[in-house]
Image (cartoon, coloured by chain):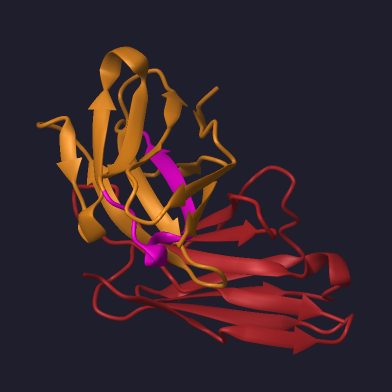
Chain colours: A red, B orange
Amino acid sequence: GAVVSQHPSWVICKSGTSVKIECRSLDFQATTMFWYRQFPKQSLMLMATSNEGSKATYEQGVEKDKFLINHASLTLSTLTVTSAHPEDSSFYICSARGGSGDNEQFFGPGTRLTVL
Amino acid sequence: AQSVTQPDIHITVSEGASLELRCNYSYGATPYLFWYVQSPGQGLQLLLKYFSGDTLVQGIKGFEAEFKRSQSSFNLRKPSVHWSDAAEYFCAVVSRDNYGQNFVFGPGTRLSVLP
């Protein structure tokens, strides 16, 4: 099946710094990528949807200036958490969908962000 | 509003026992339906999906799910649980009408398996 990778798998940073998380589709071209956030013992909440070459669409309540998303190519999307604070600590999961006719998304392994 | 419910937050079963995890959805029309499993600290793994056709869907690891339109349900089952099945299980739906529609996830059911 299609493979999606995320890098890094975990990151610890100081409050006020920015952190970039990469999401790559390894064996297919992802026309659309999604970024989710998951708090401990909770479900996944969609943060934003990005289509290659266009601006991301953010869900209500997600600060676009804080969570910068770039989908510059068909195999790479990045999420940058700017001026991170402890409340941004979470598990971030990306998913990617190709151009096929079904709506299956392939999920990355997730990135654990801890902000001190 | 579109929603997915998983009534059971936590289920404990003995190894070898049968399992059923419930999922109900509220949508205008039958959506695409999925079940995912997540081990601690890991990403999501697709167990099975329903698009159309046979309402009993077979998945990986011995799981199956049955779509019941009249009940708006897509319950996950396994006849004999293994200790390695302990994980978090998420039901998810996607609208058929719009390829741009994102997944809507249920709250999840945590499965514990007793030896």
Residue B70 appears left or right of A18: left
Residue A99 seen in the current view: no
Q: Residue at x 28, y 61 (%)?
A: A98
Q: How many marks?
A: 0
On the rendered image, what quadrant is the N terminus of chain B found in? top right
Query: Is A90 part of what is drawn in magenta?
Result: no
On the rendered image, what quadrant is the C terminus of chain B found in? bottom left
**Where does the image place residue B26, in percent across and percent down from the top left?**
46, 22
Q: Residue at x 39, y 44 (%)?
A: B100
Q: As rendered, which of A80 and B77 lies closer to the eye? A: B77
* Vertical placement of residue B2 versus A14, above or below: above
**Where does the image place residue B63, in percent across and percent down from the top left?**
25, 50
**Where does the image place residue B30, in percent across and percent down from the top left?**
30, 24
* Vertical placement of residue A27 versus B23, above or below: below
**Where does the image place residue A78, in percent across and percent down from the top left?**
55, 76
Residue A114 sits in quarter: bottom right
Q: Residue furthest front?
A: B115
Q: Residue at x 63, y 59 (%)?
A: A37
Magenta-highlighted residues: B80-95
Q: As rendered, which of B6 and B96 lies closer to the eye? A: B6
Q: Residue furthest top?
A: B70
* Vertical placement of residue B108 versus B16, above or below: above
* Vertical placement of residue B15 versus A17, above or below: above
Residue A113 appears left or right of A33: right
Residue A85 appears left or right of A6: right
Residue B18 appears left or right of B56: right
Residue A13 sits in quarter: bottom right
Q: Residue at x 21, y 70 (%)?
A: A1
Query: Is B92 part of what is drawn in magenta?
Result: yes
Q: As rendered, which of A36 and B46 lies closer to the eye? A: B46
Residue A47 seen in the current view: yes
